[in-house]
Image (cartoon, rainbow, N blue to C red):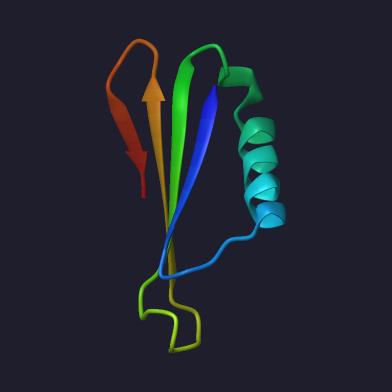
Amino acid sequence: MKVSIFSKNLFLNKEINNYICDLIREDFHTLEEKINTVKITIEDINGPTKGGVDKKCRIELKLLSKGPQRVL
């Protein structure tokens, strides 16, 4: 299972990337044989200049037997 993390208007350092990958692998370990890739996109909706709770996370799973599945 390949895990890819992308960010928009947001900097994610190596430690955060590794932490997210570890969480995904831990949470999906029972389905690992059925999942080809996991694509995670984290976005700062208002951009880097404004603060507050304005983050969006999208997780896309590509299963070995089917096309992409999105969890919003």
Q: Residue at x 45, y 26 (%)?
A: 37
Relative to 10, is 60 on the left or the right?
A: left
Nearest the viewer among 27 and 50 is 50
Looking at the image, the residue that sits furthest to the left is 67
Looking at the image, residue 24 lies above or below residue 34? below
Looking at the image, the residue that sits furthest to the bottom is 50
Residue 13 horizontal/vertical position (percent): 64, 60
Image quadrant in which you'd find residue 71: top left
Looking at the image, residue 17 lies above or below residue 35? below
Nearest the viewer among 10 and 24 is 10
Looking at the image, residue 32 lies above or below residue 58? above
Q: Residue at x 52, y 26 (%)?
A: 2
Looking at the image, residue 23 lies above or below residue 11? above
Residue 49 horizontal/vertical position (percent): 43, 88
Nearest the viewer among 44 and 11 is 11
Q: Residue at x 54, y 22 (%)?
A: 1
Residue 55 horizontal/vertical position (percent): 45, 70
Q: Residue at x 30, y 28 (%)?
A: 68
Image quadrant in which you'd find residue 50: bottom left
Residue 57 horizontal/vertical position (percent): 44, 57
Q: How many marks?
A: 0
